[in-house]
Image (cartoon, coloured by chain):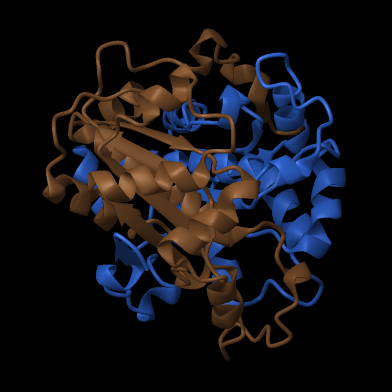
Chain colours: A brown, B blue
């Protein structure tokens, strides 16, 4: 699909049909994610791929706060046959920048003006969302509640130096699967572009 | 250009010709950036566009640490005729999630598992990089040294509630403009994909 069409078609899809997702498409999305830029080419990211019903159910059991999960959002999102959890690894960035060509051997986080481990992993996540559009799939990027991250780690053996920046559902969009904050309007571009100075 | 070709062709370009950049292309890149996803559709980002030689020179004067700027990286990057500074606004996210449909009126940052203000702004930045490829331009995303952020704010009137997550050069690639960390190799995809569990 043309790049511009992919960008313009992208929407968060929050409900899916029961049609399976071609594993080759998931693989291509992950290959694209791994082509995201990263500071110093650190590649400090990882992707937990859950693509069978049991693993997907265990994801939702681990990440849903007690007393929640009956709402429309949860019911829709749980229809997704595939989940990808993008994880950032700050340690990989500190290791990379302690190498001789960078020389930040003190590993001082004050050297970093922004958390590139999270930003770069977010770029990788966006490439998964865009690849879904390119393959006529639906996808949604969403946060994992902080109080459930420990349960998610325990369930899938995620090491302490990898942090889930969220999760992505993937599947074939159900009719009406595009909902959510779309009642809010995009603000005018000129409200966010400052030309020459603020 | 086909989406897959855009993803595969993207490289950081660190040196540019003196050919001007079509303002319509820059506008399209910003429009695409503003189509990035954002948590709760907060749209908590802004873009400082610097596209004349004076403003670009003032950017480099503000952001280059004392005694630096003579290296090959700086000399190459300074040939870019256009700069875009993507800025994240955490306050906009806290405002958005204090609204009734979210209800986080305590504005407690511990509710956030990841800094979506920076992550979403990073996704917007990636859309600028990809749009450059689609338009046969070169681009490079790079960090602003933390100790120079104050000077950057002062120079261009950036408010305290907007934080530059980096900056992007845009221009026509010079021959040999692709350099940098490319001596490092991409790690195998299967090193970063964990199927079913870690």
In the picture, measured across the screen, residue A106 lies left or right of residue B189, that is right
Q: Is residue B172 above or below residue A197?
A: below
Q: Is residue B197 visible?
A: yes
In the picture, measured across the screen, residue B186 lies left or right of residue B42, that is left
- Please give the name of the residue rendered at 80% of the width and 60% of the height, measured from the top-left corner: B148
Residue A108: give x, y in percent of width and height. Answer: 75, 77
- Please give the name of the residue rendered at 79% of the width and 50% of the height, measured from the top-left corner: B152
- Please give the name of the residue rendered at 37% of the width and 17% of the height, measured from the top-left corner: A178
Q: Quadrant of residue A104?
A: bottom right
The quadrant in which the C terminus of chain A is found is top right
| Frontmost residue, B85 versus B121 | B121
Q: Is residue A94 above or below residue A183?
A: below
Residue B141: give x, y in percent of width and height. Answer: 52, 55
Residue A149: give x, y in percent of width and height. Answer: 57, 53
- Please give the name of the residue rendered at 39% of the width and 41% of the height, measured from the top-left corner: A168
| Frontmost residue, B111 versus B118 | B111
In the picture, measured across the screen, residue A22 lies left or right of residue B70, that is left
Residue A59: give x, y in percent of width and height. Answer: 41, 47
């Amino acid at each position: 699909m043309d790049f511009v069409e992919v960008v313009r078609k992208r929407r968060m899809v929050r409900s899916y049909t029961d049609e399976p997702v071609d594993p080759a498409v998931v693989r291509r999305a992950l290959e694209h994610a791994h082509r995201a830029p990263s500071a110093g080419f650190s590649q400090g990211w990882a992707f937990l791929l859950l693509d069978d019903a049991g693993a997907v159910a265990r994801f939702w059991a681990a990440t849903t706060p007690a007393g929640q999960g009956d709402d429309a959002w949860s019911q829709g999102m749980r229809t997704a046959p595939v989940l990808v959890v993008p994880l950032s690894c700050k340690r990989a960035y500190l290791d990379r920048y302690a190498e001789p060509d960078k020389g930040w051997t003190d590993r001082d986080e004050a050297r970093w003006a922004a958390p590139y481990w999270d930003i770069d992993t977010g770029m990788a996540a966006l490439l998964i969302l865009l690849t879904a559009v390119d393959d006529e799939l639906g996808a949604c990027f969403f946060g994992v509640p902080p109080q459930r991250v420990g349960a998610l780690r325990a369930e899938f053996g995620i090491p302490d130096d990898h942090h889930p920046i969220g999760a992505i559902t993937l599947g074939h969009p159900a009719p009406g699967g595009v909902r959510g904050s779309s009642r809010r309007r995009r603000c005018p571009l000129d409200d966010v572009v400052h030309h020459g100075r603020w």
